[in-house]
Image: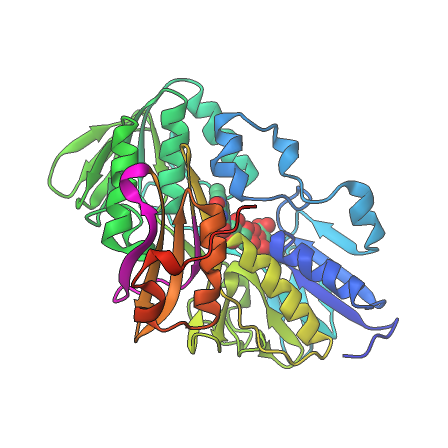
Amino acid sequence: MKTEGGKRIVIVGASAAGLTAAETLRRRGWDGHLTLIGDEARPPYDRPPLSKQILTGAWEPQRTTLRAPQELARLEIDLRLGRPATGLDVKRRQARLAGGATIDFDGLIIATGVIPRRLPHGDLNGVHVLRTLDDALALRAALLTGPRVVVVGAGFLGTEVAAAAQTMGLEVTLVEPEPVPVRRPFGDRVGALVAALHRDHGTDLRCGVPVRGLCEGGGRVTGVELADGSGLPADAVVLALGSTPATDWLTGSGLTLANGVVCDALCRAAPGIYAAGDVASWHNPRFGTRMRLEHRMNATEQAMAAAGNLLGDAQPFAPVPYFWTDQYDTKIQAYGIFPPDAELRIIDGDPADGHFTAAYGRHEVVVGVLGWNAPRQVRAVRNLVVERAPWTTSTDTSALLPVPVN
Ligand SMILES: Cc1cc2nc3c(=O)[nH]c(=O)nc-3n(C[C@H](O)[C@H](O)[C@H](O)COP(=O)(O)OP(=O)(O)OC[C@H]3O[C@@H](n4cnc5c(N)ncnc54)[C@H](O)[C@@H]3O)c2cc1C
């Protein structure tokens, strides 16, 4: 797309990906109109601290703000906050906003993220989800009253919330239908280590039992009923059941929607229309597979790629995915992909010592590496994934792994 003063690029979703897309477009010389639409009233802020520093109170809320007002002003964007986009007309190249206004565009970037899943009666008093800063502040206020907490779902979000609540000295139960926490992303072995981490800190971890429903009394949640018939009393329940892509507003637009906005390897959903961040499902040519990632780093990298491609780069987006989680004093970092049928080998350190690096192999190549309190070590072996190193030679001995001193 040529840079022309009369043309307009619209970005829908004013968070990590949307903001990065706007900054990239300006940096790359787009001097046409640029409109950033967000349904939250707050200026863009960062979500990873919400389940960590904001819940525990280690950070003041304003520390999550991604850009100071003067930095946003320098972008010279038409920033429209507090109003969702409600529809898209691909042929007319027009987005519709709540209230009925429409906005024409020459190029569009969709960055609307995801929405937390709920259970039936999930809007009862005392039931929480955690996606926005307001969610985090409401949950922190509830935790400060000293409730018995049940966290439903032991993925990354649920385990982080349980760790934060436990750190605050609360009575915490973490419920998960799979046999161990974080099993889907990282498999049984790392899941068992995460289970031990939580049990060692005093969390009552109930794995292998689905939740049947929420219990109510006097308009409030009073507990959680498990599929085995048992009940867990609770004053606060946190639903950490995963998310669904925020694509309702695109229904009927003609874009393909299937677990996100379906894009090609350029992050393009239709001519002149791109998607980035948690909402985007795209073909990652590095791994030869379609992906949709809910990772903070991906929101930045994909937004840069989508914005560049909208301006004409024509570069496939082929990242090595990166993710981290912080729980208690443990940082887990992971590069690559972690399919359920991958084999895992510890290649450095020892889980018993609380520091190790592991590699995941599939089809005879390294597809992922994971560090458990091993930031330097895992960065040093990231290249095994980049280079698709052969599984056996790269992982049969820890001696060959270079670990830089600094
Ligand atoms: C509590 C929490 C902790 C996390 N911790 C980690 C972590 O430790 N490590 C990690 O790698 N990742 C983490 N993540 C994930 C990471 O924050 C996300 O991957 C990242 O925020 C995705 O950015 P995004 O811009 O694609 O989507 P989002 O941040 O979800 O932003 C989408 C924005 O679009 C808005 N929107 C939705 N629909 C509309 C509409 N119709 N019109 C206008 N606006 C709309 C939304 O309100 C939102 O503001 C965490 C996420 C959460 C919620």
Q: Is residue 73 above or below residue 221?
A: below
Q: Is residue 180 above or below residue 108?
A: above
Residue 3 drawn at (x, y percent): 83, 75
- Image quarter in which the N terminus is found: bottom right
Asked whether the viewer can see residue 90, the reply is: yes
Residue 256 drawn at (x, y percent): 49, 76
**Residue at the far front in the pictured view:** 399
Residue extent of the magenta highlight: 333-353
Closer to us: 283 or 129: 283
* Residue 349 placement, left or right of 17: left
- Residue at 72% x, 44% y is 67
**Is 154 inside the magenta-drawn segment?**
no
Closer to us: 137 or 335: 335
* Residue 25 placement, left or right of 57: right
- Residue at 53% x, 46% y is 405
Asked whether the viewer can see residue 100, the reply is: no
